[in-house]
Image (cartoon, rainbow, N blue to C red):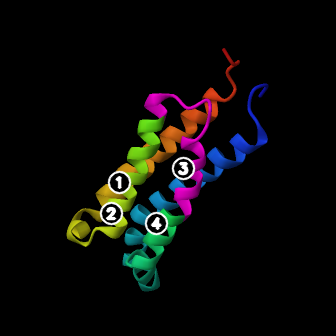
Amino acid sequence: MAGRSPGTTVVDGSAIVLSSLCLIHCLALPLLSAVLPIAGVWAEAEWLHRAFVLAAIPFSLIGLSSKRLTVPIGILIASGIGFLLLGAFVESLHDYETQLTVIGALLLASGHALRWSNASLPSK
């Protein structure tokens, strides 16, 4: 695409992949644990949840620092990271961890997908 830089593609593409992995981890591993008990160990691994969130933060910060960032996209990205942080690090919200993570991953992926598509628009 004409206006899209390779950096935008890498940052937003990586953020979308990480968000997708997060969703798969939250939604598929608990289902797999019924069939494969070892998947249950991975589904409940707190360190893995936190690692996904910590890996997503640099991509999100880069996305938030973009010159082509619009307010709605910034809100999606920041809210997504916020929900992921709440789900992974706030122990009192443990019962809502899956819901918070799914909402956060969807918001984050949506924000990066929109930023990615906006990068192909001509500059004003």
Inter-mark Cα distance, 4 to 1: 16 Å
Q: Residues within 10 Å of mark 4 (few under 14, many from 20)?
A: many
Image point 55% across, 64% down: which residue? 55
Secondary structure of the residue carrying numbered label 2: helix
Between marks 4 and 3 in the image, the one whose residue lies nearer the viewer? 3
Between marks 2 and 3 in the image, the one whose residue lies nearer the viewer? 3
Amino acid under disc 1: Phe
Amino acid under disc 2: Gly
Between marks 4 and 1 in the image, the one whose residue lies nearer the viewer? 1
The mark that comes first in sequence, 1 or 3, is 3
Q: Position of residue 120 (x, y in %)?
A: 69, 26
Secondary structure of the residue carrying numbered label 4: helix
The mark that comes first in sequence, 2 or 3, is 3
Judging by the rendered image, the residue that carries numbered circle 3 is 60
Amino acid under disc 4: His
Q: Position of residue 108 (x, y in %)?
A: 47, 46
Residue 87 tag number: 2
48 left or right, relative to 119: left
Inter-mark Cα distance, 2 to 3: 17 Å
Judging by the rendered image, the residue that carries numbered circle 4 is 25
Amino acid under disc 3: Ser
Q: Are marks 4 and 3 in contact (CB under 8 Å)?
A: no
The range drawn in magenta is 55-73
Judging by the rendered image, the residue that carries numbered circle 1 is 83
Between marks 4 and 2 in the image, the one whose residue lies nearer the viewer? 2
The mark that comes first in sequence, 4 or 3, is 4
